[in-house]
Amino acid sequence: MTAPSQDTSADEGRLPPGTHFGAYEIVRTLGAGAFGTVYEAIRHPLGNRFALKVLHPELTTSGKIVARFMREAEATVKIRHPHVVSTFEVGVVDRAPFLAMEFLEGETLRARMRRSAPMPLALVADLLVPVCSAVAAVHDHDIVHRDLKPDNIMITEPRSGVLHPIVLDFGVARALSQDSLQLTTAARAIGTPLYMSPEQLLDPDTVDARSDQWALGVILYACLSGALPFDAKSLPELMVKVASAAPVPLGSRIAGLPAAVVGLVERALQRDRAHRFASAREIGAALLPFASLSVRASWAAEFAPYRDLVEPAAPPPATAATPTVSAPAPPSRRRTVVAAVGGGLVALVVAASVAATVRSPQPPPTPFALPVAPLPPPTPVAAPDATAVEVAVAHAVVVDGGAPEDVAPIRRAQRPRVVSRAAPDASTVVLGANGAVMR
């Protein structure tokens, strides 16, 4: 194996094209994240393409960082879900831990938002209902993703017109059963502050599955409005507002959204996580009625047990209404003769039946609705400890490189982006590290 370059730039490949890394041949660098660099690679002798994630060489000297990287691999291998990226192999080559993931072509949700935000409610529901199921499957394995964001949701198109979202990048995932593993200070605050929950910003050690619910709420908010729930001009200001201020109401960003959708987002963004949903599947159940007919049919079985948990305990009382009676069809000659022969008997029976129907009209069916449980009254929140906020800001800036430009509102692109499903070339959009898209 060619010795990896020590250049930390994400734009320079640590393993040059043509390098043999175990059974893999490096084709090109796709991107770099906090823990590793991702390459497009071909596995010999069959020639299958993979996304190969290799731990940064300078991190291999830290046993704790290596343990965390390998935990990512173990987490992704055991999760089997059609909307979670698949990991096929985990190993070590020349003391460099790696994992081989499926190679995906498509675009990230971030790219889609930049092209067409705000997005229609039905499209948002179609994309995020499967994501809610995927996140719930991750939680079923006692794993918190910790870095859910539009960049980490890849949208593939297996068939023309069929969009298939896939959750990516467990590089900052944390197994709840291994809380005793302490990591370096810089690694503990890993995540994207734009989508991080208040508890993740101020006390990463207390993060649980409800933190991913907050991230889903921010993603929903951004998709539907084309903006973020907190107005801020800098990364530190954003983090302070997330920790202490109320989000800008979604209804003030965009008009015409159903009250149930606004309530859903508000509940996911409750600062007190005890007031959020009990699980990611409840978010999916609340969002499902707004999806397309095909998506509702596909996911009805999974989310049906959770529907009652986001509906009121008792349905609203039915209002009185005058039944609509359709006019009967003209009788045939044979029926006229039978009625005549039978005398008035048939007429009496029919009259009695009609009279009973008029006396006891059936109530009209109650329209289906999926309101979200009422939110608790707002609780006064004390200002966060200044030291804790400063530490959280410092951690995020160290990891994210202080990317205040991400705070800017999402804008429409000038022209649509063309996605090619042909062989990789300059127009192919592929999976990069942390959900980055590389052409």
Image (tube, rainbow, N blue to C red):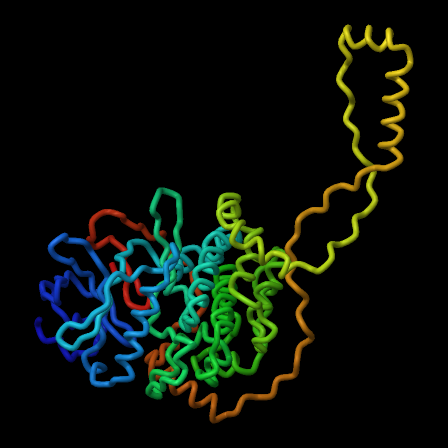
Q: Residue at x 37, y 73 (%)?
A: 173
Residue that lies at the very extreme toward the bottom in this rendered image: 387
Q: Residue at x 87, y 21 (%)?
A: 349
**x then y, percent, for residue 432:** 28, 64
Task: Identify the image quadrant of residue 254.
Answer: bottom right
Q: Residue at x 63, y 61 (%)?
A: 309
Task: Identify the image quadrant of residue 73.
Answer: bottom left
Asked whether the viewer can see residue 274, the reply is yes
Count of numbered badges drawn on the protein: 0
- Please tell me which residue lies in front, 324 or 337: 337
29 vs 405, left or right, is left
- Image quadrant holding the C terminus, namely bottom left
Asked whether the viewer can see residue 111, the reply is no
**x then y, percent, for residue 359:** 89, 35
**x then y, percent, for residue 396:** 38, 82
- Please tell me which residue lies in front, 324 or 141: 141
- Please tell me which residue lies in front, 257 or 274: 274
62 vs 293, left or right, is left
- Image quadrant holding the N terminus, namely bottom left
125 vs 87, left or right, is right
Q: Residue at x 64, y 61 (%)?
A: 372
